Amino acid sequence: MTRPYNFSPGPATLPEAVLLQAADEMLSWRGTGMSVMEMSHRGKHFTQIAEQAEADLRSLLGLTEDHRVVFLQGGASGQNAFVPMNLLGQNPRCDYIDTGHWSQKSLKEAARYGDVHVVASAAQPMRDALGEWQPYTYLPELSADMVRADAAYVHLCGNETIGGVEYQTFPWDVLPPATQVPRVVDMSSHILSRPMDFSQIDLAYGGAQKNIGPSGLTFAIVQRRLIEERCPEAMSICPSVFDYRLQAANQSMLNTPSTYALYLAGLVFQWLLGQGGVPAIAEINRQKAALLYGALDASSFYSTRVHPQARSWMNIPFFLPEDRLMAPFLEGAEARGLLGLKGHKAVGGLRASIYNAMPLSGVEALVAYLAEFEKEHA
Ligand SMILES: *Cc1c(COP(=O)(O)O)cnc(C)c1O
């Protein structure tokens, strides 16, 4: 059977080479006679796997000694709670930018622990020189005075996985300096997809199941200045296993980590290094997005709704001219091995998620099908 192209938003497609290697090592990792799943997390083999994974992630992202990397469980939704529990120990004020579904989840969760202020929101329709934009299809305008000068942090979602709205560059130049208000980014669905300057970001977190590996693993990349100097203590209600300081001091092994998921993430990091790292994969991601948006823009049959300056490279929602075409579209797609294209119910329509592991050939196959379906139904 040839492998289909899986456009699901997450858990998402993984590089075939990674799956083949994992299959090869399933029963015995490098002659140990043990599956990685069966190893003690404190034994020498798994210690080597975990250290290599962290070192490779650091190298891919260009992290320095200023950064702590922790791997936790609980999903990105768990992190939505761990962030305020870790950072509001002394100051309850936290500011959130509202760009869609996932920022709202984050700010609602934070409101259970702190005093949330919405910096700016894309909840209203917006008009500019390029046209009229529906709610959550654009990035709201920002200025430094919108953020409370004494907030413990300002939070944004780098890529709204459902809306397909991405910060193509982070808005740091129009926000207060990080030394005044630390910056927190939900990077679940675009970490490692394009170069990012981590010296500008105090805390980046996310779940692994979009662009890194299997679900069950989350990451937090945190500046030492944030958790060691600025917020040296978590809120007293913060469970120890979710305290970034304690996990960082214990190499993310305060308790048993999600060992197999971390091993697979490590294989993905190795695969990415083999591809030439983040700049090389970013160039492929740019090509994939250009090909798909180009096809959608050139057609008067399909439509997109996201503002050109906020278009995501990773998640591309698009629409058919009539709802009744949805079922035949998805049926034809599946018959051609193009899976997971149904959009999220909050947005409707279709969505192609084209993370790092989706090859250019997958987007080419999708674009060919788009043309074929249009010809048949236009
Ligand atoms: C998927 C996703 C989440 C939620 O992830 P879980 O691991 O299911 O909790 C949060 N934020 C973003 C941006 C996501 O894409």
Image (tube, helix red, strand yellow):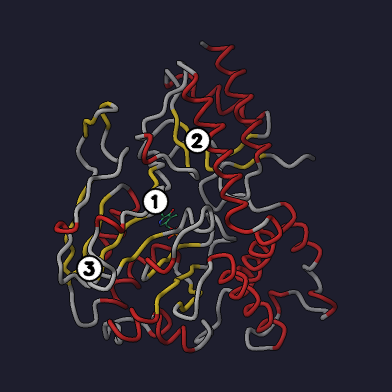
Q: Residue furthest right?
A: 31
- Disc 3 from disc 1: Cα separation: 30 Å
Distance, label 2 to label 1, CA atoms, is 28 Å
Q: Is residue 123 above or below residue 265?
A: above
Task: Please state if 196 lies on the left or on the right of 360 as rendered.
Answer: left
Q: Indicate the position of residue 78 as horizontal and vertical percent values.
A: 39, 67
* Mark 1 C-beta closer than 8 Å to ligand 1: no
Tell me which amino acid carries mark 1: Thr
Which mark is first along the chain, 2 or 3? 3
Q: Residue at x 35, y 53 (%)?
A: 102
Q: Quadrant of the N terminus?
A: top right
SS assignment at label 1: loop
Q: Which mark is residue 112?
A: 3
Q: In the image, is residue 190 above or below residue 154?
A: above
Q: What residue appears at the point 48 percent right and 53 percent down from the top-left corner?
A: 190
Q: Which residue is mark 1?
A: 169
Seen in the picture, residue 342 relative to 192 is either above or below; the reply is: above
**Residue 160, visible in the rendered structure:** no
Task: Give left or right: position of 208 versus 360.
Answer: left
Q: Is residue 297 left or right of residue 90?
A: right
Q: What residue type is disc 2 on?
A: Lys
User: In the rendered image, which residue does mark 2 sit on?
Assistant: 342
Sequence-first disc among 2 and 1: 1
Question: Which residue is most to the front?
Answer: 173
The kind of residue on which mark 3 rests is Arg
Of the two numbered discs 2 and 1 in the rendering, the one whose residue sits closer to the viewer: 1
Whether residue 237 is visible to the viewer of this picture, yes or no, is yes
Disc on the earlier residue, 3 or 1: 3
Q: Are marks 3 and 2 in contact (CB under 8 Å)?
A: no
Compare residues 33 and 94 and report the one nearer the observer: 94
Residue 172, percent across and down? 31, 58
**Depth check, front residue: 199 or 374:** 199
